[in-house]
Image (tube, helix red, strand yellow):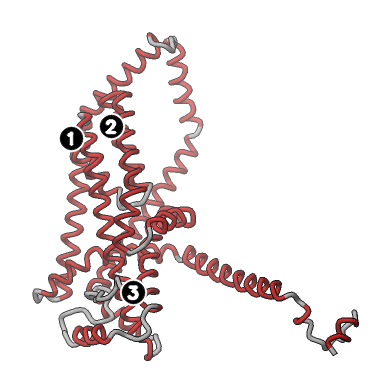
Amino acid sequence: MSHARREDPFLPKHEDVTGLIPRGLRISAALAWRFIVVIAALYAVVWVIGYLSVVIIPLSVALLLSALLAPAVQKLVAVRFPRGLATAIVLIAGLAVLGGLLTFVITQFSSGLPQLQKQLNDSLNQIKDWLINGAPHLRQEQIQDFINQAISFIQNNQASITTTALTTASTVGEILTGFLLTLFITIFFLSGGEGIWTFLVRGVPQRVRTRVDVAGRRGFASLVSYVRATAAVAVVDAVGIGIGLWIMGVPLVIPLATLVFLGAFIPIIGAVITGGVAVLVALVTNGFIGAVIVLAIVIGVMQLESHVLQPLLLGRAVKLHPLAVVLAITAGLVAAGIAGALLAVPLLAVLNAGVRSLLHETAPDPAEVNVLKDQAAQPNDAQPGSPTAEVPTRGEEDR
């Protein structure tokens, strides 16, 4: 029968031709359409996240802040502080520290501004003297023509500059709205996170609910480790650049180092902006050669951060390979800009910890189940589903 089928070039319409297709082609086609479906689903998820970015970004930042502040809240709760009061104390203290750092930076820059203006005028006069009497041998008229052209350019593009200013003002308004929303979400995460997580876990089937609960808490523990490692990287950046500025005799060393510390929490762009401020101050106060040396120091510290500190510290803290950390930051930056770079590694860390917990554990660990029950019986501590609960990690490295 099969021999006759091969000899007949015209098969009946009801015949199944699947057997005539090479096996390799069938496997390739099956992989191809499944790959297309996965890519389409990922694209839809990314599109929805981008469409709801006004909510998603504050929610994600609030989760990072909760990971940073949750240990302090837990310590206060452990000494019999009510959770609401502990949340209020930690948030107020955190805002006070952040406001104090920003106030210190602004105050120091404001007090040093007259001296910087004087040094800037001296530097401009030196540059002008070098352009006239130095190698360029420019005439006074040429320099004045250049200044006039710059003024004319600003006047001719005044409408564009005004539009940009209005856009910037709108962006500032959006940032302020996002900050208030982030603060509001953080308050509820810290004070009522156990209820939120317990509600979400109830949607999971009963037979795997405990495993999902444990996986979620382990993911949050990985997020806490990520935030701590990021703070350590920021401290190293601030100390390294601060020492370099002090050696070069650049004024405002402490406020510049503080600015670098704050900017280091924003991947890539934060270090570039704050390092650029340090280079500009060095250019005004120390001249061109001093600015070049400070630029070399800033670039060296950035290279240390990008290629050593972030891969090693973050990789060890979140149990990710250094290459995965670098690729995650790069992919996040390309896909969603600064927000993507900020959230890529913590997202990868949470997924890695959660998926490993689900895949490498065929049944819930009885010891961890007992810990969950003990925590649930404590009225003042976090419930087992709380994202702020202490996470048992016994045997984590073995898995």
Q: Label 1: few (<14), some or many (≥20) within 10 Å?
A: few
Counting residues from the start of the chain, the first of labels 2 and 1 encountered is: 1
Nearer-the-camera pick, 21 or 258: 21
Q: Is residue 223 above or below residue 20?
A: above
The residue that mark 3 highlights is: 399
Image side of residue 334 versus residue 210, left or right: right
Q: Label 2: few (<14), some or many (≥20) within 10 Å?
A: many
| Quarter occupied by the N terminus | bottom right
Nearer-the-camera pick, 139 or 165: 139
Q: Amino acid at mark 2?
A: Val
Q: Is residue 361 above or below residue 53?
A: below
- Mark pair 3, 1: CA separation: 56 Å
The residue that mark 1 highlights is: 111
Q: Amino acid at mark 1?
A: Ser
> In the picture, residue 65 is in which quadrant?
bottom left
Nearer to us of marks 2 and 3 is 3
The residue that mark 2 highlights is: 281
Q: Which mark is residue 371?
A: none
